[in-house]
Amino acid sequence: MPLGRRILKLALPSIATFSSQTLTGMLTLIIVGRLGASAIAIVGICNILMYNCWALFAGLNESINYLVSQNYGEKSMSAGNQRMQIALLLSLVLDVLWFVASLTLPREILTWVGANPSLIHAGTSYLRIRMFAFLFSMFTNVFYAYMRAVGDTKTPMLISMFTNSALIVLTYILTYGAFSFHGLGLDGAGWSMVITEGIGFTSSLFVYYVLYQRKFSTRVWQRIHWEPMRLIIWESAKLSVMELSMSLGMLVFTACITRLGTVAVAANEMALNILSLGFMPANGFSAAATIIVGQDVGRKRPLDAKRGGLYTVGFGLIFMALFSIFLWLFALRVAKIYTADAAVYTLAVSLIHIASFIQLFDGAGIIFSGGLRGSGDTTFLFRMSLILNWIVFIPLTIVLTTVFHLGQSGAWFSLCTLIVLICLSYGFRYLKMDWSMVASRSIHVQPAVLGMEEEKR
């Protein structure tokens, strides 16, 4: 298959998946926004908190994504299934711990991030419900990672588009009511996420254990050994620390802005929500880069892997450039969809204009990180994330907002600085790495009864 076609075949469904999720986030925020600025602020704070929760466990699905893609490339899916089984067992253990945290910690978390008493009172129940929804998400993310690793980006797209469509409808009904149902307010929006995440989890179970059984023998138990478990735990830990460093940086960023008042929080959430649409093409091409690089490394074609990653960056930047232009031209019109409060949308537009200049840097950095992940160079990603977030971004944000009192402008200047440095460091690493030495992180397991499709390959 021609490289360009291969990239688009993998990237476009992933873009559709991520865009569907982000667009749904925008629409549900617009729906909830009718409850007032406080509701927007609560959702914004909880979104950042849940992003940190995702980051805390993201290393598990990201490690499965690149490791199984290498297994798929080298035609050793019995090892890939063993890795997947380990990931599911680890997810089960983490889910139990997460359930306990969701019952006990929501109020303390909102207090810690600096929310005012009214936001804490109104948002504690909503955050608890959002945490319940993540009990399903933890498993679903691992299933999606496996699907993408074997080149199936369409199935996650179809599941996501269905559940996201259902989420929009349920958010309106459960928030405001319909027919004889009177609605639950903000909590109703939270329960709609629990229901739809449960549907996504159930669908993923069916795909993995039923539809994939013939191809990959996913119901055959692979005996688990310490070495592959140690690898999964170590790789997951590095990638989780990487993502958590990014998300904690954004949490500090949000906490600094939270102290500026409800209007500032609402405008910031609107701006980030709108800007996240621009991240979707980058995330889609990043997923494609991980798959292409990982599979070609598994096939022992590292130079093809490097070339595939670079082409993927090029395709992604075209998409990002188009979105940057759109963002600059239509920022005010989009912002007005969220709220009629002039103070809020005026501030949001100024933030969107600032960020539109860094979309290309952001996109390139995200896609390069996907390529590096596919090559297995996770230690570099781990180290740079720690350095750039904890030595540059977080201190700079705190100093500019609390010492020099630059408010939103100072915080967003820090964010732009972080994005540019990530792009330059990841790109330099990708181009200068000795690709001839890149090899698959192989493990060998006793052959089980493999599916007919794998035997044919």
Image (cartoon, helix red, strand yellow):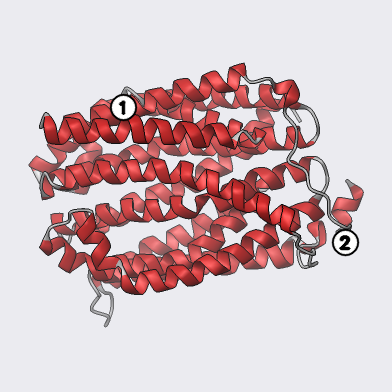
Q: Which numbered disc flags the more N-terminal residue, 1 or 2?
A: 1
Local crowd size for mark 2, using a 10 Å CA cut-off: few (<14), some (14–19), many (≥20): some
Taking the image as shown, residue 206 lies to the left or right of residue 349, namely right
Q: Quickly name the residue at label 2.
A: 448
Query: Percent from the top left, x then y, of residue 394?
Result: 29, 36
Q: CA distance from mark 1 to mark 2?
A: 50 Å
Viewer-proximal residue among 110 and 286: 110
Q: Does residue 224 lie above or below 293 as drawn?
A: below
- In the rendered image, which quarter is residue 174 located in? bottom left
Which of the image's four quarters has the N terminus? Answer: top right
Residue 402: name its quadrant. Answer: top left
- Above or below: residue 262 compared with residue 220: above
Identify which residue is drawn at 40% across, 63% down: 167
On screen, residue 55 versus residue 44, left or right, reads: right
Image side of residue 6 versus residue 372, left or right: right
Give the amino acid type for the residue marked by disc 2 in the picture: Ala
Q: Nearer the viewer, residue 292 or 426?
A: 426
* Picture disc at residue 202: none
Q: Residues within 10 Å of mark 1 (few under 14, many from 20)?
A: some
Q: Could you tell me which residue is drawn at 26 percent across and 41 percent down?
A: 253
Q: Is residue 167 left or right of residue 83?
A: left
Q: Secondary structure at mark 2?
A: loop
Residue 252 place in picture, x, y as percent: 27, 44
Q: Which residue is mark 1?
A: 416
Indicate the secondary structure of the residue bearing disc 1.
Answer: helix
Q: Could you say which quadrant of the image residue 31 lies in?
A: bottom left
Q: Residue 208: x, y in percent? A: 69, 62
Q: Is residue 301 above or below residue 270?
A: above
Q: Give the position of the C terminus as an image quadrant.
A: top right
